[in-house]
Structure formats: structure tokens, C-alpha cells
């Protein structure tokens, strides 16, 4: 089965992803982001890129999908720069897989 890739976040960030063939979903707040992520998770999306600013508003939703194999939620910086959330998640996952933080 081929999975789709979606990008959820602020309009300025997600619309350019259409140029490389990803489906983009501009949202204005955490409630909209949660609704879109939940909808995409049910619709054959294997990867959902989500801006860190939206992820910060919906940590419970991110935690829920961390326990699922599909979709993978990948955090990306917004147009304002990185909040460090994505790096923290990578460090946490590496530590879980390897047994210590090697980064």
C-alpha cells in the first residue's frame, strides 16, 4: 500500500510543500491542527509533517501518535525558526533505541 504525505501548520510554511507533491493543510490554531492530524491519520497518510508551533499546542495528540506505527509525525520548524521540540524528540527516540543519548 502506498501512503501519502501531508504537511500541517501555518500557511506560509505548508503551501511551498505542494511544489514537491505533498498535500498541505494550513491551520490557524491547535484545535484545527488536531482535527486535521486525526483526519489524515485515518486516510492513508504514512507521514505527517507538523510545524513545531502547532505541535506545542497539541502535545497529547503527538503523544498518542507516538504510540502508533502509522502515521509518523515529524516536526518541522515554522517560518519563525525552531523551538527545539523536534531535536528533543530525536534525542529522546535515540536514547530509547540505544539506551543512552549519543547525540
Image (cartoon, rainbow, N blue to C red):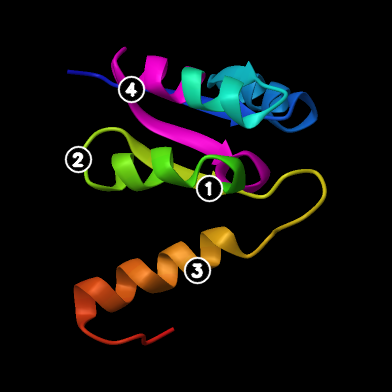
The correct choice, above or below, for 24 with respect to 102 in the image is: above
Is residue 11 inside the magenta stretch? no
Q: Which residue is mark 4?
A: 41
Q: Please, what secondary structure does the residue beneath circle 2 have? A: loop
Quadrant the N terminus occupies: top left
**Near-viewer residue (32 or 97):** 32
Spatial CA distance of label 2 from label 4 is 11 Å
Q: CA distance from mark 3 to mark 4?
A: 23 Å
Helix, strand or loop for disc 4: helix
Rate crowding at label 1 as few (under 14), some (14 to 19) or many (20 or more) other CA atoms within 10 Å: many
Q: Earlier in the sequence, mark 2 or mark 4?
A: 4
Query: x, y percentage for residue 80?
Result: 82, 49
Tag of residue 75: 1
- Stretch of the chain drawn in magenta: 36-55
Mark 2, residue position: 69
Q: Residue at x 24, y 34 (%)?
A: 70
| Mark 2 nearby-residue class (10 Å; few <14, some 14–19, many ≥20) | few
- N-terminal of the two: label 1 or label 2? 2
Q: Say whether marks 3 and 4 touch (CB < 8 Å).
A: no
Pointer 3 residue: 88
Amino acid at each position: 500500500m502506498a501512503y501519502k504525505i501531508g504537511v500541517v501548520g501555518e500557511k506560509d510554511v505548508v503551501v511551498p510543500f505542494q511544489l514537491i507533491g505533498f498535500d498541505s493543510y494550513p491551520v490557524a490554531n491547535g484545535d484545527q491542527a488536531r482535527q486535521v492530524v486525526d483526519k489524515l491519520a485515518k486516510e492513508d497518510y504514512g507521514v505527517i509533517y507538523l510545524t513545531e508551533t502547532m505541535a506545542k499546542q497539541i502535545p497529547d495528540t503527538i503523544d498518542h501518535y507516538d504510540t502508533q506505527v502509522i502515521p509518523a509525525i515529524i516536526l518541522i520548524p515554522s517560518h519563525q525558526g525552531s523551538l527545539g521540540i523536534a531535536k528533543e524528540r530525536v534525542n529522546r527516540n535515540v536514547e530509547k533505541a540505544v539506551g543512552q543519548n549519543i547525540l
